[in-house]
Amino acid sequence: MSIKQKSLDLRERMKSALSGGGSKAIQKQKAVGKLTARERVVAILDPKTFHEYDLFVEHAAKDFDMDKKYLAGDGVITGTGSVGGHPVCIYAQDFTVAGGSLGYMHAKKITKIMDHAMKMKVPIIGINDSGGARIQEGVNSLAGYGEIFFRNTQASGVIPQISVILGPCAGGAVYSPALTDYVFVVDKISKMFITGPEVIKTVLGEEISMEALGGAHVHAAKTGNAHFYAESEEECFGQIKQLCTYIPWNNTKRPDRFPKKPPKTRIYKPDDIMPTDPKEPYDVRDIVKSICDNSEFFEIQELFARNIVIGFARLDGQTIGVVGNQPAYLAGVLDVDSSDKAARFIRYCDAFNIPLLTLVDLPGYLPGVDQEHAGVIRHGAKILYAYSEATVPKITVIMRKAYGGGYIAMCSHHLRADFVFAWPMAEIAVMGSEGAANIIFRHEINNAKDPEKVRRQKVEEYKTKFANPYVAAAYGYVDAVIEPSETRKMLIHAIEISASKEVLAPSKKHGIPPF
Amino acid sequence: MSKNVKQEDSVYEEMYVENSVYITEVPDSYKNRKLYAPINIKELTAIIPGTIKDIFIKKGQKVVKGEKLIILEAMKMRNIVDSPIDGEIKDILVKGEDIVRKGALLVEFK
């Protein structure tokens, strides 16, 4: 055969492999509003950068007549390309080929591209659209999952790992996304659960739809498994690209620096956003926008544990991670979910060299038996652990309330914040004035002729004396009391000064955080 | 504990945290949270969802602590439900092959 003939033969073989599960299966995929695996990969990557490998990989299963079946690419597409001009590794499960089921060679393709990502120190993007383990391949399917989970864990904190759920992701399969940094879900398309509705119905008699059990909104708002929620695949891909502009390519690098832009202070004026009465609500995201470049705040887990806000922004062109209490929701208290949400994000920023900005305004922890019994001690401790452990530049702005344990937890100097600034309205105290006065002056109040009058008097007395930033400033727990309008300038300087920050941590294999 | 306060176009409510009232959005998940109820020793409930496979007791029967009362099959296991106390069976609220949810009342003691 001539080279030309050989090349034609190659093209024939490729055509067959590239056809996936065939036109019928592709039609079915399209009918439910889903793109094909290859279309998804191309849509996420920069134009014309996708290079595919292992196109000719085939399964080697023999049982149950599997030896008579040809599965194109064994149901998964792997390759490399770039996002925003940076190289990435990517894989996408192809639901049109045997339901994207995971067999031995399917898993091998995934682990091979993961190994490649680790070796080259570039991010890995995984698109999940699979019915689960390929039952015909038995224990080899389980081995495949296990090998993926191990690599997810090894890669954690070294290279960014992004999971995109664009179809079912059930049973053991859910644990790969859960081990990665960011999980993207799309309304009506993503479905994640350990035990499906069928089994739940048969075993427990509980009837629930797939959407209500493990749909995109459930994971974005209720379980916290998902970090980004989109209405369409297209919107989801936009979110992925945007995220990629904020994060570094591996843990030895810093995020790209962008041209600096001033915030839109005509729309977002801190003096107008914040009511001085510490009991009145406002949206802390408006404060972030009043400080950061171009007033752009890229929020993560927007719908989950809304009493704390996390996300990325830029200061002077540099990425920062923002953690802020949200007084407009549940008064901005810390609770089981918000502690969990913030702690994980703090550790992400620390692993990937992203300075942390903490905006404080919280009354304390959410009271109640349900919170105590849900383990608010264990979960709340995660924030303390994450902040204390983090060695990236840590800058805290105490805006209004910082009471009790909440004050300590929100990146106080005691947990080694590098800079703590307070606004003049800040109230840094052991507890709110009402509570403190009730305890300290209990006898005077109870023995008074008019207890209510004396109580109010004492509350006012306490407020005047202690509900301010100056007591903490007198001990050096606050580095500077600043006017809100000075905040951006102070933060930019603080980050500049911290550029070569070095911390000597005690030698250890790893700590034991309160997981 | 909380009442509606209209503020601009969103509905904020009052919420108590440590002696102070805050104006904020209070989600249903907080308002409808399960309130604590002390455990009633006279009521035996299912600790796991499953299917009732065997019942070894009758109404009015005296039992001792640790006595085998029911087999509750769940998670591919036949779980033995013991009596938590010495007492007399007042009522049995399940029968064979019933599918029960977690927390379902199985047996009442006198």
Image: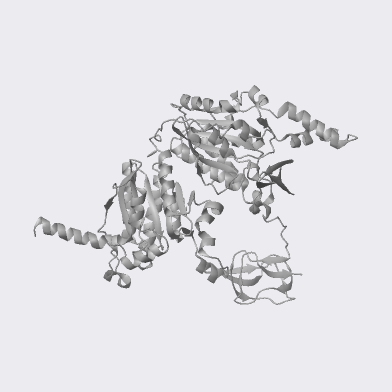
Closer to the camera in the image, A14 or A261: A261
x, y percent for residue A69: 28, 69
The residue located at (53%, 46%) in the rendering is A302
Q: In the image, is A154 to the left or to the right of A376?
A: left
- A213 and A418: which one is in front? A213
Return the residue found at the far right.
A449
Q: Residue furthest left?
A: A2
Tell me which colouring the rendered structure shows. Answer: one colour
Seen from the viewer's position, the closer of residues B34 and B97 is: B34
Horizontal relation, residue A352 to residue B58: left or right: left
Q: How many marks?
A: 0
The x, y position of residue A401, in whole percent, is 66, 34
- Name the residue nearer the viewer: A22 or A162: A22
- Does residue A388 lie above or below A196 as drawn? above
Image check: A418 left or right of A446? Answer: left
Q: Is residue A138 visible?
A: no
> Does residue A244 sit above or below A507 in this rendering?
below
> Does the image show residue A436?
yes
Where's the C terminus of chain B, which quadrant?
A: bottom right
Instruction: Left or right? Give the position of A473 relative to A501.
Output: right
Question: In the figure, residue A24 lies in which quadrant?
Answer: bottom left
Question: What percent of the width, then of the height, locates residue A483?
Answer: 60, 25
The single residue placed furthest to the top in the displayed view is A474
Q: Residue B70, percent across and down?
A: 63, 72
